[in-house]
Amino acid sequence: MRTVRLTVVLSTMENLVKTYSDGMTEEDDKAFNRQWDVVPPKNVYDVRNDETSDIVLTPDAIAADVVRHFRPTGRMLDPCRGSGAFWNHMPGAEWCEAREGRDFFAWYEKVDWIVSNPPYSIFAEWMEHSLKIADNIVYLIPLAKVFSAEKRIRDIYAVGGIVETRLYGAGTALGFPFGWPCGAVHIRVGYKGPMEWSFYIPNV
Ligand SMILES: C[S@@+](CC[C@H](N)C(=O)[O-])C[C@H]1O[C@@H](n2cnc3c(N)ncnc32)[C@H](O)[C@@H]1O
């Protein structure tokens, strides 16, 4: 009886340790990413049967708020403009979009600001590339994509820091097909200060 109970306790503890150990395992991360591998587009592209699509289009009001709030200036780039949610609000900005034959990974020119909602399933490589070419990066993203992996946080702080995270709310509230909390994370190369929070819908 005692042995059975002890086994149950030990296995529960093992599961807890697995769940709460330092962020996601590689397998967890893959499963997490797969959530977005088939996302029906809301407009513009007809890629419903494209299993490799990684398209979650940002509502105009949210993209407008991101640009208004973070005020990008100088040379700007939307690295994956989709149907232009962010790009439309950044006059003169450069752009990439894989579906229009402009691969972000082929872009090496320096820019002052990158602003967008990036493809989630390749976010780790995407962030590494972004940090090489931009002084300021603002990505609207499920926050877990940034904060659930120790390596991602350390990679950011190896070159700079997070100036601010602006919380927009659950993905479903933004019309996204998932409920994880989404925010715009502003990373600046060379930044050493604290991270501020702001709220699209004020905390009352
Ligand atoms: C999450 S969607 C966001 C689209 C748009 N930024 C928005 O917020 O509405 C990600 C976009 O990244 C594009 N994409 C994926 N890989 C890319 C790459 N290597 N270079 C450029 N764009 C890419 C996809 O085609 C898709 O339009």
Image (cartoon, grey):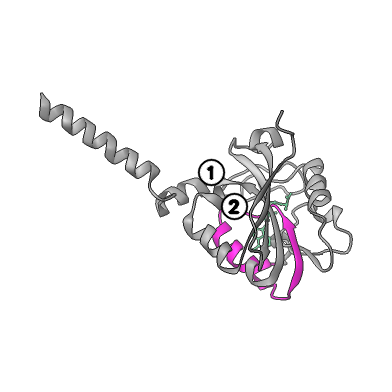
Q: Examine the rendering and report whether any part of residue 85 can be seen.
A: no
Q: Which residues are magenta?
A: 103-130
* Residue 19 horizontal side relative to residue 3, left or right: right
Q: Quadrant of residue 201?
A: top right
User: Foreground: 148 or 35?
Assistant: 148
* Nearer-N-terminus badge (2/1): 1
> Dividing the image into four equal quarters, which quarter contains ligand 1?
bottom right
User: Foreground: 25 or 167?
Assistant: 167
Residue 16 screen position, x and y as percent: 34, 38
Picture quarter with the C terminus: top right
**Would you say the beta carbon of the disc 2 residue lies within 8 angstroms of ligand 1?**
yes
User: Foreground: 53 or 129?
Assistant: 129
On the image, numbered disc 2 is attached to which residue?
Answer: 120
Q: Can you tell which mark lies on residue 35?
A: 1
Q: Can you tell which mark lies on residue 195?
A: none
Q: Quadrant of residue 106?
A: bottom right
Q: How many marks?
A: 2
Residue 200 screen position, x and y as percent: 75, 39
